[in-house]
Image (cartoon, helix red, strand yellow):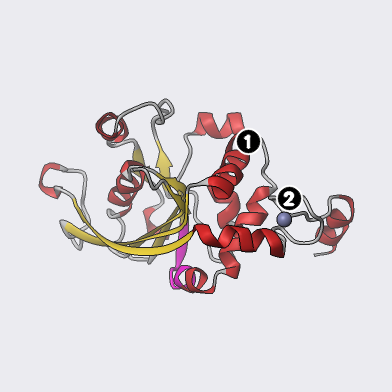
Amino acid sequence: MILEKALNLFFPIKCGVCGKIGLPICKECEEKIKPFEINLVEKDDILFNYMSEKKISYKDNKANLRVQKIFIYKYQDIIRNLLINYKFMDSSYLSKSFAYLIKNNKKIYSILKSYDIIIPVPLHKKRMNERGYNQTELIARKLEIPVETNCLVKTKNIKPQSTKTAKERQIDIKNIFAIQNVDKIKNKKLLLLDDIYTTGSTANECIKTLSKATNKIGFIALAKDVYN
Ligand SMILES: [Zn+2]
């Protein structure tokens, strides 16, 4: 706490949108962000064909998993700029702004707190070394809910997804995640966290992998790409 106060003296907290000193998102900008809220909660039936996947060994797995999917914002304008800044401009301080927005959103935050553990969508080791941090993990760590980053791992480093079609992405991403230290998450209520939801192929592949450990899984994305 003392260290945090000292750091705030030298690096004062400022609004991630307009730069005003005081809060991670100032009141004015918070109002501007509100119209982009979708607060959408969907129940998605995710069908996995477990019959063809021999690796699955936990007997309480069901072939049909109902997953609560939550999207906080539309991936547009102010939110889109903030996320692009955060992901590609080396602006790790913006994790504070996103965590602040989530915790200030009572509806969303109460859903989050109903989960045992947050699992940020992992980066491949190589990517993690290049960037120095996992942007989703940084936000998760500020939400005051246990975070686990040692259980879901990305085993293959694939090229950026943005230029590919939905079908190509699905093929690319198949079986690139794996579970380790399963005891830490077995039968726990897990919340997978991602920044941007586009086609859902990454989220679904992560959920499929996590379902080897539990059938209580939810998903939350900061923003949903509304054109997909
Ligand atoms: Zn502001």
Q: For the N terminus, which image quadrant?
A: bottom right
| Residue drawn at 77 percent across, 50 percent down | 19
Please provide percent x and percent y for residue 87. 58, 39
Q: Which residue is mark 1?
A: 132
For this view, does 10 lie left or right of residue 73? right
Mark 2 or 1, closer to the camera: 2
| Residue range corresponding to the magenta coloring | 111-118
The amino acid marked with disc number 1 is: Gly
Residue 186 shows in the view: no
Residue 112 falls inside the magenta stretch: yes
Specify the label residue 18 is tagged with.
2
Secondary structure category for the residue under label 1: loop
| Residue drawn at 14 percent across, 47 percent down | 49
Residue nearer the viewer, 191 or 82: 82
Looking at this view, name the residue that lies furthest to the left: 51
The answer to which of marks 2 and 1 sits earlier in the sequence is 2
Secondary structure category for the residue under label 2: loop
Q: Is mark 2 within 8 Å of ligand 1?
A: yes
